[in-house]
Amino acid sequence: MKIAVDAMGGDHAPREVVRGAVQAARENGFSLILVGQEPRIREELSQADAPAGEIEIVHASEVVEMCETPGIALRKKKDSSIRVGLSLVAEGRADAFVSAGNSGAVMAGGLLILKKIPGVDRPAITATIPTPHGPIVLIDAGANVDCKPAHLLQFALMGEAYARKFLGISCPRIAVISIGEEDSKGSDLTRETCEMIRRTNLRFLGNAEGRDFFSGKADVFVCDGFVGNVVVKTMEGMAQALGPFLKTEIDKSLLAKAGALLARCAIRNLRKRLDYAEYGGAPLLGVRGGVMICHGASDRKAIKNAIVAAGAMARFRLDEEIARSISAQGSVPL
Amino acid sequence: MKIAVDAMGGDHAPREVVRGAVQAARENGFSLILVGQEPRIREELSQADAPAGEIEIVHASEVVEMCETPGIALRKKKDSSIRVGLSLVAEGRADAFVSAGNSGAVMAGGLLILKKIPGVDRPAITATIPTPHGPIVLIDAGANVDCKPAHLLQFALMGEAYARKFLGISCPRIAVISIGEEDSKGSDLTRETCEMIRRTNLRFLGNAEGRDFFSGKADVFVCDGFVGNVVVKTMEGMAQALGPFLKTEIDKSLLAKAGALLARCAIRNLRKRLDYAEYGGAPLLGVRGGVMICHGASDRKAIKNAIVAAGAMARFRLDEEIARSISAQGSVPL
């Protein structure tokens, strides 16, 4: 098992990426390849007290910046860390690729270099969200803005395979995100998607609403990438706002201040549990091999968690499971 | 100033509605009309110790159930509390209508009976959401599933008028909800909407992401009713999940338990502040007169708050302000 890591990707690269990689290698015994500008990576490794040879380096001279247009950047920068890292997976030299860099470029590169799993039209980003009832899966979290019902059906199949193999949910319950529980509610897209999923053998519950994410009603929530991206970022923003919100309330009373001091650890843990970055990253499902897309703001801990998750995805051969699951629905008219 | 209240609408009607109305009349001095089945309203009023004559009653024999298809229910039930209540506003006998009943029927009835403000194609539901930086406005929160750019432009104009007149924000900052900050990011709908809003004199910031709801970046967030409904319900679900989430963490340590006891009031206040039902309801903007749509689960307090908000909307003549604002953009090609 070998994971390639984009050392140049993210707001805090290369430092935080290299530190996260060193942690994953030491604490979790991962075999890693850091991809990027070798001199900078070497410097960071030496500052992290990592002896030469502990982590492999593959040089890539170029960096795709966060603000670049994905397609153009990929075409122009043939020696970017994203292209080189994905190629390592395509050539079988690595089992998965982790990047906190330009997510559009990672997605486009995944399609271009790794290719799609047969039967998948659109790879999708898969967010894992902590809830009081355990983690839920939201797919697509932002890869595809405009979708057809057949795409959402594929997302359902991929999300089901992920929840089953990766999260260990034995028979995941699938729902389509809509604006009412009745089948008639929603858009043309959600109604047609519901009809298609009903014809499969998935454990399908029909429509779910925004409040159902936290109600324990379903395990996998299917939507287009526009809705999914807005939802995931709304949750992220709300979790981050918890601190300032609670502080305002606590500052109002001395008693509450004393209490907050005692409960500080619990409150910190709550914020951590609500922080979806704790899951390290979101896999791009539907391409061959494993690709883990991390938050641009990822720190060393998020990178470490993403490497651990990418390792698990590769170990479970999630891409092969998805291929099996999609081909088993072969008789379903897309 | 007179507010008509749908006594039969909501999961806890008529009891909670009548109790909320009695509170609004007593504590806030509102002049009210309760609309619905007179014997049941009289009984509730007497149980609430409200002397005859304190609150006016207008009889309506029929009730639109929560599960009914709005259009059909409105057509069939000519003497429903929703139709009768809206007619009171249309006839000038009331200044606004408050209902926790079938929201689709209230919307359809608003269009049918009150009519649209000139220049408005689609009335929209307007959610007011508490954040650490003060309240923000999200429009449309669920009235229109499929929208064109011109509709979103009108939502921006209506939301701006609401934020300015009702929330007292002197020069509201407007943003379009999308999946990236750059103008190029998003769907065809968001891109074309941005172009149109840029041609107005609104204080327009361009795209905003889900995490910006809580960042203090903008005051009014514009989106189609599908996205808006999912967002508002996601926030609602997350706020409700806070309690169980925090409890799990606090139960882990005795120290945290003691602290939570002291900070209990602050934690309760936080949950209250995150509960969008505290705002009582969401106005349906774009129709003549005032319509306040309440959560089906509204209790007496939510109803009271909604009546207070409906009173303020009517006092500010928000519908006339919207008409002015839209006609001032007359030269903008829709």
Image (spheres, coloured by chain):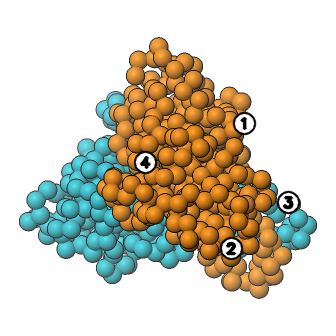
Chain colours: A cyan, B orange
Q: Look at label 4 and name its amino acid.
A: Gly
Residue A313 lies, in percent from the top left, at: 36, 67
Residue farthest front in this picture: B52
Give the number of the mark in front: 4 or 3.
Answer: 4
Q: Secondary structure at mark 2?
A: helix
Q: CA distance from mark 1 to mark 3?
A: 26 Å
Q: Which mark is residue A1?
A: none
Q: Nearer the viewer, mark 1 or mark 3?
A: 1
Of residues B197 and B283, the one drawn nearer to the viewer in this rendering: B283
Chain letter of disc 1 in the image: B
Q: Residue furthest left?
A: A331
Give the distance between the C-alpha atoms of the residues marked 4 and 1, in whole angstroms: 29 Å
Q: Of B102 and B61, which appears nearest the observer?
A: B61
Residue A243 x, y percent position in the rendering = 71, 59
Whether A102 is drawn above or below A191: the answer is: above
In the displayed structure image, the side of residue A220 where residue B50 appears, left or right:
right
Q: Considering only order in the chain, which callout, 2 or 1, is on the residue closer to the N terminus?
A: 2
**Residue B51 visible in image:** yes
How far separated are the C-alphas under marks 1 and 2?
39 Å
- Label 3: element kind: loop
Amino acid type, label 2: Ser
Marks 4 and 3, Cα distance to the nearest angstrom?
A: 46 Å
The residue indicated by pointer 2 is B46
Residue at the spot of label 1: B168
User: Residue at 57% of width from left, 34% of height from top?
Assistant: B319
The residue to which callout 3 is attached is A251
Q: Chain of mark 3?
A: A
